[in-house]
Image (cartoon, rainbow, N blue to C red):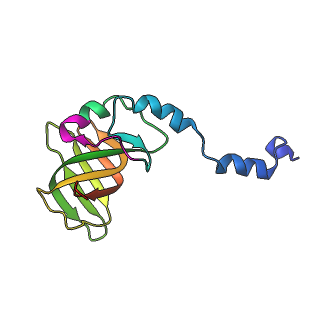
Amino acid sequence: MNAATGGLSVATIALCFAVPSSTPSIASNDIFADRPAFSEAEQPARRPADCKDVRRMADGIPELDYRIDLSVVGNLTAVQTDQVLWYLVLCSPPDIRIMCVTYQSNGLAVGDRVIVRGGYRRRDVDHVLLDPCLASRPEQ
């Protein structure tokens, strides 16, 4: 026993930090109810959203202290690189624009139909960032 840890052993404290909490799973059930393109981190979405559906699904998602993923299918409107990362953009106004930050282009070009999946972050009312993100052609 240690007075500094309130009587808990170091092993008990380490175990508390090592075992993930079940809170995200419980809380996310309500978040994902009418949002089939969203999922817990690293889990598949029930179905990817089309560009026209993202705003409706994303509106009302609160700031979370854990990662959730979004899957979107659409045509690329921009492909850029800084020689380290690739920035793939899809969806055009009035839809929310989606930027996928990834490590490779996979030969994708503007106009290609893609599916992107990644860590969701709403930047503002009209922009979503997916980072990390994976991109591929829908048939892959």
Q: Residue at x 32, y 51 (%)?
A: 117
Camera-side residue: 37 or 139?
A: 139
As drawn, 83 above or below 23? below
Q: Nearer the viewer, residue 39 or 89?
A: 39
Q: Position of residue 82 (x, y in %)?
A: 26, 67
Asked if the stretch drawn in magenta spans residue 129, the answer is no
Query: Residue 27: where, in percent of width, then height?
Result: 50, 32
**In-image side of 14 versus 98 (left or right):** right
Indicate whether 56 appears above or below 74: above
Residue extending furthest toward the bottom: 83
The quarter of the image holding the C terminus is: bottom left
Residue situated furthest right in the rendering: 1
x, y (%) of residue 52? 18, 36
Q: Is residue 130 above or below residue 122?
A: below
Q: Across the whole image, how many numbered discs are drawn on residues?
A: 0
Q: Residue furthest front?
A: 139
Residue 135 coordinates in the image, percent (x, y):
28, 57
| Quarter occupied by residue 37 | top left
Magenta highlight range: 44-54
Q: Residue at x 26, y 45 (%)?
A: 72
